[in-house]
Amino acid sequence: MILADDKIWDQNGFNELVRRQLGPSVDDDSGLVYAYDGNLKLGLLPASIFCSGHTYFVQAMFQHLRLEAYDVHTTFQYAGTEGKRHRLREAKVFYDPPEYYNPPGGLLTFKPAIPKNLLLHGEHSIDTHFALVHYQVIPPLWCRLDRLWFGHPGILPGSLTRPPFVCPLDHVFEINVMLKEMPNEEFGPGISIREYSIFENPSMPQEVKKSWLDVHLCQEGSPGCQTAFSKLKDVKVIQFSSMQDAFDGFTDKTREEQFRSRVKRYVGIWCCVENHTPGHIYYDMYWDEKPGWKAAPPNSTADDHPPW
């Protein structure tokens, strides 16, 4: 059917199969029914191991039930093909060539330290979700609420999602925008990213893992505190103990404006508040520079635009 008609793709092809004569049952025990005018047998596969993008990447159903997933389908995700690829990379089930794990400029990472009150205190609400997300820099990214295309109470009733949870990067960030070529004159140089689980991937070469430098920040001017990176330019991985106060700002104002123009486009929306139109809430990379900023949907369609 699909090969015979280029206007039919897998989803509407499946719909056609089901909408043809469905039934009767094959027998009393198997759970199978005849479909497509009796030409096929149709049965249900358990969502716990034949996973959708939600049961695998968000609910982690197979982990909660201590099962091994048989396959995963990248549904319930955002940011297009780039978002699908990044989710599979986070799960360590996407094949990348060796050079992906050993880029010429090396890798920069850090140890996130999230206060328990942001993770666990209070109910899982819009305010506590945004407070948690705003505290973090990727990766990994913890969330208190799920993201969908329609109004919902935060966590789907009946799902195994247990907040707070490590959510896919595309729940907050526009990965397709992050990876898109942008004019350097307006947005400055591109920023490469890697998934948070890259160092746990069996494909990560040992030569990269062993070429590792742990950096602990010190007070400028204190005894023993000096810039020593120039002696270690060939180290492949630099890990900061914290990124708090690690960057004092740009000295080049043009470069700063280019950087800000780039990264403020990186964040997307949370969706969606129930019984409100529009129901989504825009993330804002520079929310902390705006006194009184509050996580709330646009008041009207006229206000419905990104914060830039």
Image (spheres, rainbow, N blue to C red):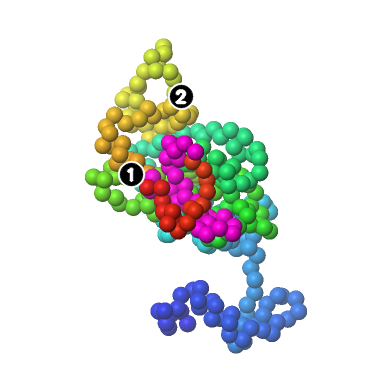
Residue 84 visible in the current orientation: no
Direction from residue 23 to residue 36 in the image, left or right: left
Work out whether residue 252 or residue 23 is closer to the camera in this orientation and state it: 252
Q: Residues within 10 Å of mark 1 (few under 14, many from 20)?
A: some
Picture coordinates of residue 109, whole percent (x, y): 44, 36
State which region is magenta.
264-292
Residue 276 visible in the current orientation: yes
Q: Is residue 164 above or below residue 113?
A: below
- Indicate the secondary structure of the residue bearing disc 2: loop
Work out whether residue 243 or residue 135 is closer to the camera in this orientation and state it: 135
Work out whether residue 49 or residue 145 is closer to the camera in this orientation and state it: 145
Residue sticking out furthest to the top: 223
Q: Amino acid at mark 1?
A: Ser
- Indicate the secondary structure of the residue bearing disc 1: helix
Q: Nearer the viewer, mark 1 or mark 2?
A: 1
Which residue is tagged 1?
Answer: 261
What distance separates the C-alpha of mark 1 from that of mark 2? 30 Å
